[in-house]
Image: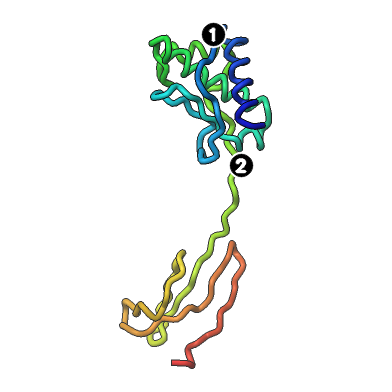
Amino acid sequence: MNDRKLQQLVEYISLTFFGRKFNHKALFNHRLRTTGGRYLLQNHNIEINPKYYEEHGMDELIGIIKHELCHYHLHIEGKGYRHKDRDFKELLKKVNAPRFCTPLKQKKTQKKQYFYQCYDCSQAFVRYKKMDPARYICGKCGGKIYLLKYRVDGGDKHMINYKSRR
């Protein structure tokens, strides 16, 4: 689906469910990450997150459009258009629009743990960001630090022990 088809769909839903015309722009915004869509107060446009259409389909998209059109029509009429307002909640029920959209599936990110150790006192250090051991010293004794091993989501990756190469 492209922006032109989205515009036609929003205009159709506005006429069908609200009985009013939608006179502004509706478009996809690929930069939206945590929300299904948004209504812009300044220019009255509606932006939709395309990931919701790709992941959840047309029914979810229609629900998001109805929700944003509730904001749009109430704001144009000068009524309470915010989530906490009674007018907004009543219009949501009237047009059967969801108050919240279904969450997107989260991408699993691999967590890494880096285990460092001091040459002199064998003090262990655990870090989640990789660091250059040559730039740091042991906080306990002031000795040099080396990378002992790192772990990615539970599996250990053993590193070469450079202890002998002082």
Q: Residue 18: x and y, percent?
A: 56, 9
Q: Quadrant of residue 66?
A: top right
Q: Nearer the viewer, mark 2 or mark 1?
A: 1
Q: Residue 144: x and y, percent?
A: 38, 84
Disc 2 residue type (three-letter): Lys
Assign the N terminus to one quadrant of the image.
top right
Q: Residue 72: x and y, percent?
A: 47, 17
Disc 1 residue type (three-letter): Arg
Q: For label 2, count other residues whose C-alpha is less than 10 Å away and answer few (under 14), some (14-19) or many (20+).
A: few
Assign the C terminus to one quadrant of the image.
bottom left
Badge 2 marks a residue whose secondary structure is loop
Mark 2 vs 1: CB contact within 8 A = no
**Residue that label 1 marks:** 20
In this rendering, would 59 be left or right of 145? right
**Residue that label 2 marks:** 105
Residue lying at 60% horizontally and 35% vertically, measured from the top left: 50
Q: Quadrant of residue 134?
A: bottom left
In this rendering, would 55 be left or right of 128? right
Asked if 69 appears above or below 155 in the picture, the reply is: above
Q: CA distance from mark 2 to mark 1?
A: 34 Å
Badge 1 marks a residue whose secondary structure is loop
Residue lying at 48% horizontally and 78% vertically, measured from the top left: 147
Asked if 18 appears above or below 45 in the picture, the reply is: above
- Residue 81: give its label: none
